[in-house]
Image (spheres, coloured by chain):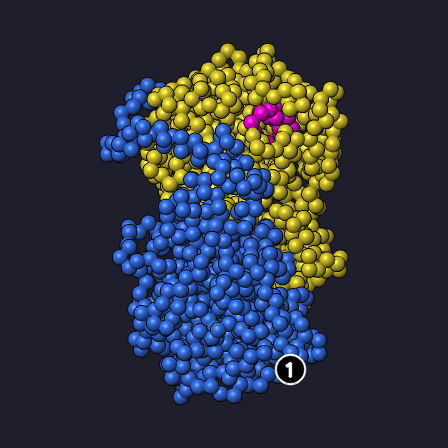
Chain colours: A yellow, B blue
């Protein structure tokens, strides 16, 4: 693992980010080429196990981008290779144009040493020609299988062979998960609105991914500066750190100054989709006075961010004026930043939300760049007491209505969800969202299943996230230990990502996603055979697993020991299990086991002698 | 928080444990007297909030014992006050007798400096007179409401008034949770076998607690030395530390040397039930050679431990000879220490389990002291692949059979459960256990919902534990971050306990347990009103919450700030929510909200103008 510190561009302050690079242990980056689109190269990670296992490497999904490819030289000041450029230009339906000029307000009027340097490389932004829609949805409806669609199909299969359909072990509540993902299936899922590939034509560095109920559950990591703390360098580092551990998308929720330039550095170096909440930057442009927001400033911000390449916008167009009274008796009011800002604006002006009223024009902008909607849950419940209340579901109804409008304009859509919801109310959220929003992908924040554990809300929410992922939610927005208390630092980001990888994978297993259990099985075999290094390397966080083991058994010899410090050599049940198997083989136990299974319960005396 | 280091007793080595004492922040210990039994004093914890809130203190369940009572002087060498002594002697159905002499084998032949000193205070053990059963079950069946039963009834109500039955918000899958817990209800639940009060007559220091589906979900913390690491002093400290954070019972799973003396120090200082797996000590007595175990050695160990006051025994009497072949093709074999030991013994001797064959006599021993059964899940699945397999459910059937035998002898019984189980298979475990074991309380280890995250198995299992607790499991055995990797240290114990308090409380909320939501509501109100100290103090881990907040906002003034570093002053949604409410009050929003609710959807134009 290397820390790369690139040479700063001339004239800029020396605050160029350093990021973490290098593969995870025992891991190789493998690229799978396309067939319909031979130029695509789809990354996967292969984790090798000890030769004594006699097993092939385990293939796992890899969101970490070129940073873990030892063959790639990382230069943060140059950005990642624009791998999509050829695919986009081959479609010949968009054109470069002179970008909107960056205004001082875009960076919160920062200047001098406080101004984050502009990104050294500038490209002219692309925009659709002739009023076309350049969205994956438009292509899918036209029956066109794009390079992005084939890319994600290959990505989802993780090298599984087409024919390898076993019996399905799971409960997917009526989802339609295929044994093997074809580009055609991806195309249908996009066309139906059940899935999205967030992929702005101005984000050519993106390694495309798909968000949808019939694919693996994805996770998002939130980051971004606030007025109180953090910096562009830290945020770029956090972005690379978060995808190293498995974040599938990243949201830049920066507030404060330097929002524009910070975002540019992130985007040019991001192999994952980047989401934002444009309202934050719009609010900074009016000095933090919500009442001073205008549609014109907001519209301009959408274009500014679309030109940079933001892949999805969270837009709280469902916070309507007449819903706001429904929050007045809540325990925690409105907990969404965007939702509270819009509510304040609406009340002050006593007018309908300008996001709602101008929604059609927002669609027109987004379809010209393929920015996906993440329809915001501004009225989500921020406490157990507020869950599933009238405010929350009124907004959901509106999000359903807006989904249809966006789809009519060929815009890709996902729907944001809660929040704080006790376990017995979670399924109703999923069912309602499916029914109300035409099966558009659901993207929830947790939900947290109790309020009583600030400091541990990654855990309170992992419970709800795993469950709602199982029920059909397509992407889970992580929560870190700092939730409710402060801005997450680097360590919090990692903890949040690992926790949400757990939730997403638990959901995949429960849904019976083909191939999901392969990693669990490989790790459990390694555990059972005391291949300690393999157990660590196959886990979500090899460093921590190894470190925890080594705290009590640090010597190299311990890595092949048939025990650990939990039980010691005499009491290790796995070691004893091996003894049992050796004994069993002598006795022909396998045959006994078969016979038992055939005959059912053996006629053996019960302890009280009655049978 | 004080660290008390008692003066070592004369002649003993100076390894007397130091433990953590003193109340948690803003907390008072309150004792509620009995009515039927006026001599009992039931502890509760009251957390005070800031006067500006205008709210009474929040009452929460308190398992921490006298260690958090500033009025009590702790002397680890003297042990806790024997609060139950009078209650037990008043029943006049047991008698003191000369204890079994402690053998060198009981402490693994440790001697000299390696021998943990004997506990300085020795009492003659009690045993039932005249072949009576002195179990809570026997009393309940006779319609006797014991002091222990009234104690737990008061404890479960947390000071709620009898009349305060609101509408129930939860899904309890057919449980029978009362609005208010009476001693009569407790008596009925015990008599039916649906609940147990683990309370050995030789553990007079115990603050009684109840384990049952119709009461709050409880958690257990495992600890104990292993041959590789830890010590008596560390384990006593861990026990006190674990209950400080909320462990309802503690299992001493010590292996290695000094098992007897270590356990004595723990028991004499434990206000919570202590569980053990007697097979471990029996195995140490035969030098770790499972084949050399005998019924006689085991029987003697049961008596040895019952005399000391162990409140429940995990007994793997369901690992029957003819089930062992069912594990041969598993991915992780037998992962239970006790289960693997018994399997090895059975196979080697090609004989039925001596635990199973002598089960009736085990009952006779346990009924004489009121040691509860925890019928062990020796064949639980240790990997996702092995979940719900034939081995697991064959053992469960036998546990059901053994439950009836134990009940016929007036022994209290709970049933242990898995393990590693993907989410879609969890409910089936609960349903099967209810049907098979006569509704005896279920006590699960997690379950872990995926295998891929060693280092984070407190989280992989919290997901399963919360769900199975919701479905009806009565007690959840914690899992720490060290699971699969090594023996948990003090910090791991705390993390495991907090995580499992989350899971148990999330289950209580989802079940609609009356009063459970009061703490969530109080904390959320504190959060919404920026009463930061109250938010921290009401949380499960006030120190960590405060510390996380202070990492970015450490000044005293920040404790009344209407923002934190996540969003800063301009973007804090809660602050903006307050502005909204002020605005709303001016506009008569409350009336608007009411009107909206009455009329349903207002007739407002939709964004595309169609309605």
Residue B318 screen position, x and y as percent: 49, 71
Q: Is residue A581 found left or right of B377 in the rendered image?
A: right
Residue A18 screen position, x and y as percent: 70, 33
Q: Is residue A76 magenta?
A: no
Question: Residue B331: in sight, yes or no?
Answer: no
Q: Is residue A261 magenta?
A: yes
Q: The disc numbered 1 marks a residue on which chain?
A: B
Tell me the residue at 50%/56% (across/down).
B24
Tell me the residue at 24%/34% (across/down).
B598
Question: Residue A2: in sight, yes or no?
Answer: yes
Residue B191, placed above or below residue A296? below
Residue under circle 1? B104
Residue span colored magenta: A256-274
Residue B213 screen position, x and y as percent: 38, 61
Tell me the residue at 45%/29% (across/down).
A338
Residue A244 screen position, x and y as percent: 64, 39
Residue closest to the eye, B79 or A66: B79
């Amino acid at each position: 693992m290397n820390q790369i510190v690139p040479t700063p561009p001339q004239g800029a302050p020396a605050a160029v980010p350093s990021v973490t690079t290098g593969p995870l242990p025992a891991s190789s980056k493998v690229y799978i080429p396309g067939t319909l689109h031979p130029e695509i190269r789809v990354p996967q990670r292969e984790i090798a196990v000890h030769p004594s296992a006699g097993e092939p490497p385990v293939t796992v999904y890899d969101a970490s981008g070129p940073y873990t490819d030892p063959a790639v030289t990382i230069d943060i000041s140059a950005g990642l290779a624009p791998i999509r450029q050829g695919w986009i230009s081959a479609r010949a339906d968009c054109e470069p144009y002179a970008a909107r000029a960056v205004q001082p307000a875009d960076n919160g009027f920062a200047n001098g040493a406080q101004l984050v340097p502009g990104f050294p490389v500038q490209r002219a932004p692309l925009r659709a020609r002739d009023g076309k829609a350049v969205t994956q949805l438009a292509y899918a409806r036209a029956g066109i299988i794009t390079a992005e669609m084939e890319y994600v199909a290959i990505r989802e299969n993780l090298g599984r062979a087409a024919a390898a359909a076993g019996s399905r072990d799971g409960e997917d509540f009526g989802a339609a998960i295929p044994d093997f993902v074809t580009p055609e299936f991806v195309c249908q899922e996009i066309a139906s609105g059940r899935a999205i590939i967030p992929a702005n034509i101005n984000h050519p560095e993106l390694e495309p991914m798909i968000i949808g109920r019939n694919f693996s559950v994805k996770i998002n990591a939130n980051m971004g500066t606030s007025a109180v703390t953090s910096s562009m360098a830290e945020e770029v580092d956090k972005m690379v750190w978060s995808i190293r551990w498995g974040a599938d998308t990243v949201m830049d929720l920066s507030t404060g100054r330097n929002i524009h330039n910070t975002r540019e550095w992130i985007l040019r170096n991001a192999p994952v989709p980047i989401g934002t909440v444009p309202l934050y930057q719009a609010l900074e442009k009016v000095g933090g006075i919500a009442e001073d927001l205008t549609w014109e400033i907001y519209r301009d911000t959408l274009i500014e961010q679309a030109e940079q390449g933001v892949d999805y916008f969270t837009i709280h167009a469902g916070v309507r004026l007449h819903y706001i009274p429904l929050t007045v008796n809540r325990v925690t009011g409105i907990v969404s930043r965007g939702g509270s800002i819009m509510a304040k604006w609406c009340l002050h002006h006593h007018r309908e939300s300008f996001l709602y009223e101008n929604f059609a024009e927002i669609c027109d902008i987004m379809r010209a760049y393929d920015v996906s909607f993440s329809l915001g849950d501004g009225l989500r419940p921020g406490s157990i007491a507020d869950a599933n209340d009238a405010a929350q579901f009124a907004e959901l109804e509106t999000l359903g209505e807006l989904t249809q409008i966006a789809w009519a304009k060929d815009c890709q859509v996902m729907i944001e969800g809660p929040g704080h919801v006790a376990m017995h109310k979670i399924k109703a959220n999923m069912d309602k969202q499916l029914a109300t929003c035409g099966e558009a992908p659901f993207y929830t924040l947790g939900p947290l299943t109790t309020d009583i554990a600030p400091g541990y809300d990654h855990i309170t929410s992992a419970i709800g996230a795993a469950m709602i992922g199982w029920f059909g939610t397509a992407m889970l927005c992580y929560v870190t230990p700092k939730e409710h208390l402060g801005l997450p630092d680097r360590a919090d980001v990692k903890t949040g990502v690992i926790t949400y990888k757990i939730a997403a994978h638990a959901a995949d297993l429960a849904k019976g996603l083909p191939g999901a259990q392969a990693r669990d099985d490989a790790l459990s075999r390694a555990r059972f055979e005391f291949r300690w290094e393999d157990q660590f390397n196959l886990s979500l966080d090899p460093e921590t697993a190894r470190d925890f083991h080594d705290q009590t058994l640090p010597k190299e010899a311990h890595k092949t020991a048939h025990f650990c410090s939990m039980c010691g050599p005499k009491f290790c049940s796995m070691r004893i299990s091996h003894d049992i198997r050796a004994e069993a083989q002598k006795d022909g136990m396998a045959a006994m086991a078969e016979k038992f299974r055939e005959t059912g319960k053996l006629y053996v005396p019960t302890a009280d002698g009655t049978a």
